[in-house]
Image (tube, grey):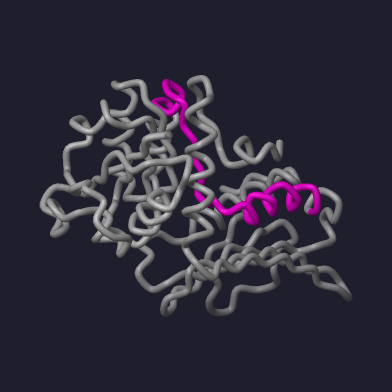
Amino acid sequence: MIKVIVAGAAGRMGCRLVSLVRDSTALTLAGALEGKGHHALGEDAGEMAGAGHAGIPITDDLAALMERGDVVIDFSAPEATLGHLRIVAQHRRAMVIGTTGFSASELDELKSLGRQVPCVLSPNMSVGVNLIYKVIGEMAKTLGEEYDIEVIEAHHRLKKDAPSGTALKMAEILARGVNRDLNQVGVYARKGLIGERSRGEIGIQTIRAGDIVGDHTVLFGGMGERIEITHRASSRDTFARGALRAARWVVRQHPGLYDMMDVLSLR
């Protein structure tokens, strides 16, 4: 049994992870983590997740849990995730990171630390989304300059970062496919008399509303036709199950920074 520590265990994703680990025949819950001062500290992680008594109290001390666990799964917040990864690196354990919204400097540190241990970093753990990652670069390369490219994403009203990490990764893949620098051609908002759309720009548009779990659409617009690829997540379980798949995979790997394309053998 692979021993899992769940960070952000009282959050929306954390609760689903706890519940699905409890149902797994390959994984067992070894620890549950929340930030200092969180209202759930001391509560039973299974009961917090609605999965029954687990005998695992939620704590704020990851270092104290590390001897019990093989892998930490983290969908918390950038600063917290970095702190957790520092501790994981010190204890030479594995980690799966689904947190998004890192600044450039935070991402640099994360990548440096992530290479010291087996670590999967992905803004989206969905199998379907990662399959889309694989195909859209080739589509962009084939369609070329004659097709405009737009990425549209929608999430629930509580999501803190925008655009989503998934949308940004899609845009990066698309930009590489047409040999463009996303920093130069990315357009994140349009308002007013903006003139004609430039041939090279890649639009990344954001919607925040209600309880949308996660929708992403890549649109290729040509003269006389439009191609759209859409992924809609109807449950957070699609991300949680992908993270558990990554956890089962990463504990068998050498130190290094991986993503879901590696986990799914899509390279």
- Quarter of the rendering containing residue 221: bottom right
Magenta span contains residue 175: no
Q: Is residue 47 left or right of residue 104?
A: left
Q: Nearer the viewer, residue 204 or 70?
A: 70
- Residue 179 x, y percent position in the rendering: 74, 43
Range drawn in magenta: 112-139
- Residue 164 x, y percent position in the rendering: 49, 59
Whether 232 is drawn above or below 128: the answer is below
- Residue 159 x, y percent position in the rendering: 38, 65
Q: Nearer the viewer, residue 59 or 158?
A: 59
Residue 111 in view here: yes
Residue 189 in view here: no
Q: Is residue 5 left or right of residue 221?
A: left
Q: Is residue 204 left or right of residue 65?
A: right
Q: Residue at left 50%, top 67%?
A: 235
Q: In which quadrant will I find the N terminus?
A: top left
Q: In which quadrant will I find the C terminus?
A: top right
Magenta span contains residue 120: yes
Q: How many marks?
A: 0
Q: Residue at left 52%, top 25%?
A: 252
Q: Is residue 252 left or right of residue 34?
A: right
Whether 72 is drawn above or below 254: the answer is below
Q: Nearer the viewer, residue 6 or 222?
A: 6
Q: Residue at left 17%, top 45%?
A: 59
- Residue 106 x, y percent position in the rendering: 36, 38
- Quarter of the rendering containing residue 216: bottom right
Whether 193 is drawn above or below 73: the answer is below
